[in-house]
Image (cartoon, rainbow, N blue to C red):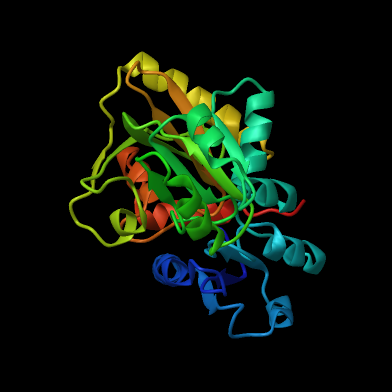
Amino acid sequence: MPDFGKVAVLFGGDSAEREVSLSSGAGVLEALRRQGVDAHAFDPAKRELGEIRTFDRAFIALHGRHGEDGTIQGALELLGIPYTGSGVMASAIGMDKWRTKLLWRSFGLPVPEFALIDEGSDFTAVEARLGLPLFVKPACEGSSIGVVKVSAPGGLRAACAEAARHGSPVLAERGIVAGEYTVAILGDEALPIIHIVTAADFYDYEAKYLRDDTRYLCPCDLPEARQRELRRQALEAFRVLGCRGWGRVDFLMDGEGDAYFLEVNTSPGMTGHSLVPMAARATGLSYEQLVVRVLSLAALG
């Protein structure tokens, strides 16, 4: 086991995803300690950030604003403390679903058709262009917080108002509903694809964290050659944004079998329902081995 020194596990925070982060961080902290790592809990919402100067390395298990958007990464850069996951720029871009899509599209990666909307938008025109169903979401939130599915004509205005309660800008996105998949990234490797099958209307917060009837197919049910190509594209999507260390790239598939990249997660969940540990297990990597591997990839710059 490498000597990582004194390690801060950052979790909790003040974002809308605090509860998920508390669960992720508790799992990471326990796993690191079981491996003999000198790991300590550090909740930035409860402690002065300057106290982290006494640590040698940081495992970021924060989700959402101030933890996944480049904010905490910038602070750790200034303090000279190596940290897990992507750097400042990639974290900031990855948290912004709109700018992520702009970059991916400019590199020729397929994304669902989308539009930025606000209370002054021509909602009828947006519905006509994107078609139904469509999804409306705050561009800079995670865990499906504030996401609304619009299935009936005339529903976009109310969906925009609901999503805007959780932050702006608000993104409307064509519904690609034949299948939802995710690819975990660890170092330079794309792990096995997971096909997410939910009994809910879509893979919302409840389906992600609270329901027991969501199914995860890993290895997934796509042909092997198709899986290899999608894993290659997911790794490209990850690198295009400047991401590093570990993360997750989500994509959707339509009825014709065409894939559309949805978003990147630069600080993935590590709860009992989380997807990166599931993909790692499919390669023979235990939860404990995974967290040590992620910690070993901590860096600055």
Task: State left or right for residue 54 relative to residue 293.
Answer: right
Q: In the rendered view, would you say 116 is above or below 15? A: above
Q: Residue at x 69, y 51 (%)?
A: 92
For the question of whether residue 81 can be seen, the reply is no
Task: State left or right for residue 126 relative to residue 208.
Answer: right
Q: In the rendered view, would you say 125 is above or below 108? A: below
Q: In the rendered view, would you say 167 is above or below 181? A: below
Q: Nearer the viewer, residue 131 or 108?
A: 131
Q: Residue at x 32, y 20 (%)?
A: 255
**Residue 268 place in picture, x, y as percent:** 48, 53
Q: In the rendered view, would you say 172 is above or below 3? A: above
Task: State left or right for residue 65 relative to residue 281.
Answer: right
Q: Nearer the viewer, residue 261 or 245?
A: 261
Task: State left or right for residue 34 relative to residue 214.
Answer: right
Asked which quadrant contains residue 218, the reply is: top left
For the question of whether residue 16 can be seen, the reply is yes
**Residue 27 place in picture, x, y as percent:** 39, 67
**Residue 78 place in picture, x, y as percent:** 81, 65
Asked which quadrant contains residue 209, the reply is: bottom left
**Residue 204 place in picture, x, y as percent:** 35, 52
Q: Nearer the viewer, residue 292 or 91?
A: 91
